[in-house]
Image: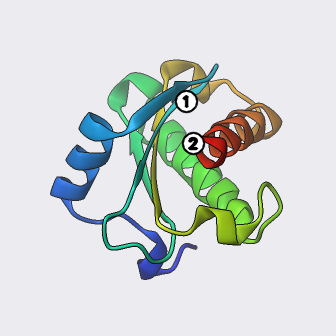
Amino acid sequence: MLDKAHRITSASDYKHVVRRGRRSAGGSTVTYTTKNPNGGEPRFGFIVAKTVGNAVTRNRVRRRLKALSHDVLQGTVVPKKSLLGLDLVFRALSSAAGASYDELRDDVARAVTQAVTR
């Protein structure tokens, strides 16, 4: 579970990241990243639409993305200090319903690495 400090909760923040952020498309996800003007801890958001599947499938995909975000925060993908001030929103594509955990992990790792190197 992500702490409240690591979650994007307001609709205006989601809208800002999706509209103004940089986009990185993968096989199962599209990731939007932007710098938080207030700085601070990295924050994550998740968009899993009905096109992904029924409620059970959508919740499974969301839980997997949250677990992968938790791994990112632990510093297993990139050093945590390089994530400071970033807002990341993961939008699951319909192919995420059939994607394995490893495929989602590869998508998230690639997107986070790109966000940090930009």
State left or right for residue 101 relative to residue 85: right
Picture quarter with the N terminus: bottom right
Badge number at residue 29: 1
* Res 25 quadrant in image: top right
Q: Nearer the viewer, residue 41 or 106?
A: 41
- Residue at left offset 70%, top offset 60%: 72
Tag 2: Cα neighbours inside 10 Å, few (<14), some, or many (≥20)?
Answer: many
* Res 32 quadrant in image: top left
Tell me the SS state at disc 1: strand
Residue occupying the far left of the picture = 12
The tag earlier along the polypeptide, 2 or 1, is 1
The image position of residue 41, as x and y in percent, is 50, 75
The residue indicated by pointer 2 is 61
The image position of residue 30, as x and y in percent, is 50, 29
Picture quarter with the C terminus: top right
2 and 1 marks in contact (CB < 8 Å): no
User: Callout 1, which amino acid?
Assistant: Thr
